[in-house]
Amino acid sequence: MENVLDVQNLSIEFPTETGVVRAVKNVSFQIKKGESLGIVGESGSGKSTVAFGLFNSVPDPGRISSGSVRFLDGRNFLKVNTEERRRFYWEHISMVFQASQNTLNPLLRIRRQVDDIAEAHQFNKKKLRQKAQSLFEMMYLDTDRVMNAYPHELSGGMKQRVSIGLALLLDPEIVVLDEPTTALDVISQGSVLKILNGIRKELNISLLFITHDISVISEVVDSVMVMYAGQVIERGPVNQVMSSPTHPYTLGLIRSIPPLVGDVKNTKGISGSAVQLDLLPKGCPFYSRCDMRMTKCSEIPPPWVTLDNNVSVACHLAKNEGGDKNDRTQEHFKTI
């Protein structure tokens, strides 16, 4: 199946008073038609910066220092001019931002905001209004009420669904969702994610979720990519990563999720604070916070290892001297 998005060796850096900081380092991934990928990590891990990189809109003074972003036509999106980029946005790739309900224009009714999109992309207003109504119906919204409402007249969950509908309006091949449920209550979160998963299957579009909470997206993505300190440290099918996390950081993220029922005594946060990007060790970036660190972890970058369950991980514990999966690693994970 053809890739709708192919990112290779994307690196993004920011100049600081102490030198250049690499917020994203050699990130690569692909998404196929109809596939859903989650990028997970703590605040500062680089996941949202990756999203800005996809749109070639990294905030100043940051810049993309290397890499390529290719969509269906095979062109490197980072090399096209501003006018081509503007035409490409929303028609081929769109984005739902963090707290995206706040990006709706508070002075305009929703129908007027649909018309503005039609004008900007030279679409027929009447047809696009009909398309918006159809999408809002798929999201269980009262279309007449919503189209004639100002944003402040809608609840947070309704505004979020409107924002998602607008992102789907021009039939993009892929939609990027940056923390799409952060500002919502638990019930609204579940509703929005269920709707998104249904729309993905019905329209056969690709979704890229970006979140700090791996539990939120575990039921709606096919695969997951875990980031720490601007680097990918584990990736694979979401059911494999959730049930058998291989990297100590991934395990820490999962163990920090409190259960909905039962005893919370086994819930354990990750010790320490996120590492400063200008003070990274030579080896593994997670070294200072890892409960299973070895001496070589601070000096030698961990190799990429692909395991039998199709999970890839950058960790010394995942590989023994013979190059096979290390049984000792699994014993470590059972005891911490």
Image: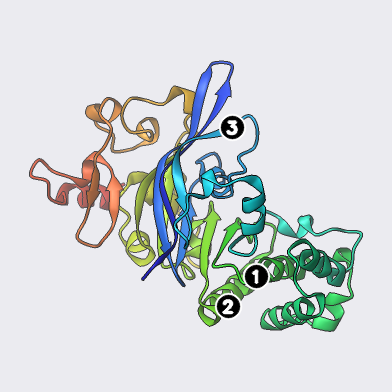
From the viewer's side, name the closer residue of 59 and 41.
59
135 is higher (above) or lower (below) than 244: below
Dot 3 crowding, Cα within 10 Å, few <14, some 14–19, many 20+:
some
Residue name at image x 53 percent, y 51 percent: 212
Q: Quadrant of residue 197?
A: bottom right
Residue name at image x 50 percent, y 26 percent: 21
Residue underneath mark 2 = 199
Task: Say left or right for 94 vs 5.
Answer: right
Residue underneath mark 1 = 168
Residue occupying the far right of the picture: 107
Mark in the foreground, 2 or 3: 3
Residue 25, position in %: x, y? 42, 37
Mark in the foreground, 2 or 1: 1
Q: Do the residues under discs 2 and 1 have CB atoms within 8 angstroms?
A: yes
The mark nearer the N terminus, 2 or 3, is: 3
From the viewer's side, name the closer residue of 129 and 306.
129
User: How far apart are the two marked residues, 2 and 1, measured between alpha carbons?
Assistant: 10 Å
Residue 60, position in %: x, y? 65, 32
From the viewer's side, name the closer residue of 256 and 264.
256
Residue name at image x 27 percent, y 25 percent: 299
Residue 307, position in %: x, y? 21, 56
